[in-house]
Amino acid sequence: MVLRGLAPRRPNARARGRSVAAIALAAVSVLGLAACSSGGSGSGGASAVAQSSSPSPSSTTTASCSPNATRLTFWGWPAGYDLAVNEFNKTHKDVCVALENAGAAGDEYTKLSDAIKAGNGAPDIATIEYFELPSFEITHSLVDLSSYGIDSAKANEAPAAWAQVSQGSHVYAMPVDLGPLALYYNQNEFSQNGLSVPTTWDQFATEAATLHTKNPADAMTNLDPENAQAMLALMQQYGAFPFTYTGGSKLGINFTGSNEMAFAKYWQDLISAKEVTTAADFSPAQWSNLDSGVNAARISPAWGPVGMQLSIKNTLGDWRAAPLPQLTAGSSASGNWGGSTLAVVKGTAHAKQAAEFVKWFGGSADSWKILSGDVAGAFPGYLPLLNNSAFQQRTLKISGSSTSNVVFAQAAKNIKAPEWPPIMTAALTQWTDTFAGVTKGTETLQQAFTKFQSQMTDYAKSQGFTVTGS
């Protein structure tokens, strides 16, 4: 069987473009914060999608290199990565890493794919978000790092992070950051409206109805139907993730199963009742709704509060984090929105040295001291930092003296890793058009799910996959 057309090539998707631009701004602006607890992404976190505002990295990250060092090229766009590369070069005299910005996310993936196809111009190391890894794995474009001792890093990584970079005994990238979800709510709005922090989705709907009845212009939260990654993260937490994939040519696609349609009905009922809004994520409308009390809560990834506090002013200090509501009382499931990895690109002449670098970058205290700092602001998949009391006790201006990292760190350990399919480029591109009618009110989520099921099934089959599902 020949699997065709799987090399990542991403037309501009409206939802993704919104989030990349918004979080890039947040990452650049976060320099002055006293305490930073997050990363970000229309994908990943501020560290996962934001372009660094530093000077040309390749001119600044090799200054301390030995003339005889093995030279590696690293493609990466997130803020603060140049600082970590500088530290590596200072402390590893036999290896010299030059960081180059080949564009953020999809722009980089297109260039990387083209370079691999051409057989020249590819870097030794590339930043690749979790959801995009299978598209490179299936084209045999990445080095299996298990041959270079990467398994020794596994014990220090959140299980959900490690699961997304490995297939069986093979490891195709080193995890860096994560984007675990929590309910980020305005405690003043909750108190003034007599709302309880919901622990189940049934209670969430009840509280949403109570709020909207008291204040018809208000809604509990916002759900952007056109933001594929936010929707998929919520579906993951709900037990309704629509893809199953463990490598090879068999792919499960199921947007019309019982769990998936129950998820769609749940949120469509809230949308129809105007108990949630459908503003574009990271848009001025979303920030205005959060800052004016139109929305009392936000379903937020761990990197969300940093960007949010740069976009609101009236409710700074009022926001608190709580675990996401659960489908079943007493459960502790979370979803993940965002995060990046470092992969070693097949064809490099220096796979051993590249593996040494990526292991240090994603799995060392020295690197994470930089990556979790005020410039990069990445939320770690690195357990020693997730479990660190000082990290968990950090505060942000938006949440006053409360310690949101306690909630987000626990959520990071409660993520069940999604099985990303190697057709995410097409899925993200198609999603915006298919789900636009939900935003406009001309179709329901159930109808959009049914349509998307057919579209993705047809596409996957055209690429040579055997598709199972509804």
Image: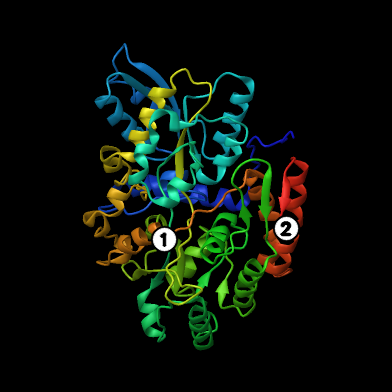
- The CA distance from mark 1 to mark 2 is 28 Å
Residue at 39% x, 57% y is: 412
Q: Position of residue 248 (x, y in %)?
A: 64, 40
Residue 150 image offset from top left, x and y in percent = 39, 34
Contact check, label 1 and label 2, Cβ < 8 Å = no
Which secondary structure, mark 2? helix
Q: Which residue is mark 1?
A: 414
- Is residue 247 among what the camera can see? yes
**What residue sits 44% from the left and 23% below the top?**
351
Question: Which quadrant would the C terminus be assigned to in this image?
Answer: bottom right
Amino acid on which the number 1 mark rests in the picture: Asn
Please tell me whether mark 1 or mark 2 is closer to you in this view. 1
Q: Which mark is residue 453?
A: 2
Q: Is residue 32 above or below residue 237?
A: above
Q: Earlier in the sequence, mark 1 or mark 2?
A: 1
Residue nearer the viewer, 234 or 353: 353
Crowd band around label 2 with a 10 angstrom C-alpha radius: few (<14), some (14–19), many (20+): some
Relative depth, front residue between 277 and 132: 132
- Residue 50 seen in the current view: no
